[in-house]
Image (tube, rainbow, N blue to C red):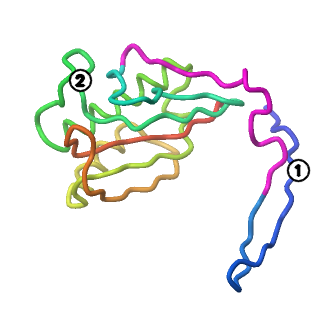
Amino acid sequence: MVAPEVRVKTLIAPVAGLAVLGVLAAGGCASDPDARRVVAAPGAPAAIGPYSHAVEADGTLWVSGQVGIDSATGQMVPGGIESETRQALKNLEAVLKAAGYTARDVVQAQVYLADMNDFVAMNAIYAETFKSEPPARATVQVARLPRDARIEVACVAVKR
C-alpha cells in the first residue's frame, strides 16, 4: 500500500523568546464530521465515565485507557500487577478487535502505573502482547487510577 502524499509545512513561532518548531500536516484531521466513528466493545468492561471505548477517524483509532477489570464480573481481577496487566491488555485487545484492528496496528501506547516499582513485572507481561515491532510507548507513574487499579493502558492504532 502506497502512503498518500502528505504536504508538510514547517512553522517557527517565537514564544517567550524561544523559537518553537511546529509541524502542520495538510489533511491530518477528519474534515467530514461523519468520518468519526465511536466504538463500543462488547468484550471490554463498560466505561467508568462519560467516554467511549475508542473513536476512529481517518483510519486512526484512539483507544481509551483500559484497566484490569474483568468484563464478566465488573470487578478488578485479583493477583496484583501481573494479573491486572494481562487483563488490561486483554480489554485493550477487545476494543481493538471490535473496531477491526489488532495489536499489530498499535503505533503508540501509554502506560500509567500506580507504582513505578511495578515496571519490570508490567514490562514482562506487556512484551507478551507486543512481541515484535512493539509500538512507541510512554510509561509514567500516577498518583491514582480509577477503581484503584495498579495499571491503565491506552493506545493509538493505525490501519496497516
Extent of the magenta region = 24-43
Contact (Cβ within 8 Å) of mark 1 with mark 2 = no
In front: 109, or 52?
A: 52
**Amino acid at dot 2:** Asp
In front: 88, or 130?
A: 88
The answer for how far apart the CA atoms under marks 1 and 2 are is 44 Å
Q: Which disc is residue 70 wearing?
A: 2
Question: Which image quarter holds the N terminus?
Answer: top right
Horizontally, is 62 left or right of 25 in the view? Answer: left
Going from N to C along the chain, the mark reached first, 1 or 2, is 1
Which residue is depicted at the point 28% across and 48% down? 124
**Amino acid at dot 1:** Arg
Q: Tell me the crowding category of disc 1: few under 14, some 14 to 19, or many 20 or more residues within 10 angstroms, Cα based.
A: few
Q: Which disc is residue 7 wearing?
A: 1
Horizontally, is 5 left or right of 113 in the view? Answer: right
- Choose top left, top right, bottom left or bottom right for residue 153: top left
**Above or below, 123 relative to 36:** below
Q: Tell me the crowding category of disc 2: few under 14, some 14 to 19, or many 20 or more residues within 10 angstroms, Cα based.
A: some
Question: Which image quarter holds the C terminus?
Answer: top right
Horizontally, is 154 left or right of 68 in the view? Answer: right
Q: Position of residue 126 (x, y in %)?
A: 34, 43
Q: Which disc is residue 85 wearing?
A: none
Q: Position of residue 20 (x, y in %)?
A: 71, 74
Residue 38 colored magenta?
Answer: yes
